[in-house]
Image (tube, rainbow, N blue to C red):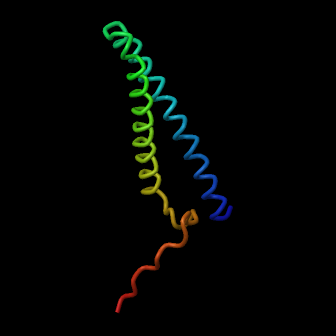
Amino acid sequence: MNKKRNTILFMLAGTVVNVLLMILFFLLLLALYARYLIPSLPESTASWFLLFIFIASIVLSFLVYRRIVNIIAKKIDMDKYFDPIFGNRRPPPKKP
């Protein structure tokens, strides 16, 4: 496989993993909310908590996804297998 195809597959797989993590965190936080907070909170706060759960699931999925990408970046040489997305990197400075 060439670098462009590797980059496209990596981005697609990363997007799928990030969305799945978000759904997983949303369902987990929703279950915790339903189990522990619904009985003790008034009904008027339900919509605010759902919004908070949604935002928290996005933030948590981003943090976990970022950690996964950092682990992958430490194990493999990204420049060797993937093409730069936003243009070429600057060449390293020449030593005198």
Q: Is residue 15 left or right of residue 96?
A: right
Residue 25 lies in quadrant: top left
Q: Name the residue located 58 percent from the left edge and 52 percent from the top edge.
A: 11
In-front residue for pair 24/33: 33
**So how many labels did they put on this image?**
0
Looking at the image, which residue sits at the far bottom? 96
Spot occupied by residue 29 in the image (x, y as percentages of width and height): 41, 23
Q: Quadrant of the N terminus?
A: bottom right
Q: Name the residue located 42 percent from the left edge and 57 percent from the top edge.
A: 74
In this view, 43 is above or below 11: above
Q: Is residue 27 left or right of residue 96?
A: right
Q: Name the residue located 53 percent from the left edge and 73 percent from the top edge.
A: 88
Q: Name the residue located 49 percent from the left edge and 34 percent from the top edge.
A: 22
In this view, 40 is above or below 67: above
Looking at the image, which residue sits at the far top? 39
Spot occupied by residue 5 in the image (x, y as percentages of width and height): 66, 59
Spot occupied by residue 31 in the image (x, y as percentages of width and height): 44, 17
Residue 15 lies in quadrant: top right
In this view, 59 is above or below 6: above
Q: Is residue 16 left or right of residue 44?
A: right
Looking at the image, which residue sits at the far left? 40
In this view, 72 is above or below 38: below
In-front residue for pair 62/94: 62
In-front residue for pair 90/38: 38
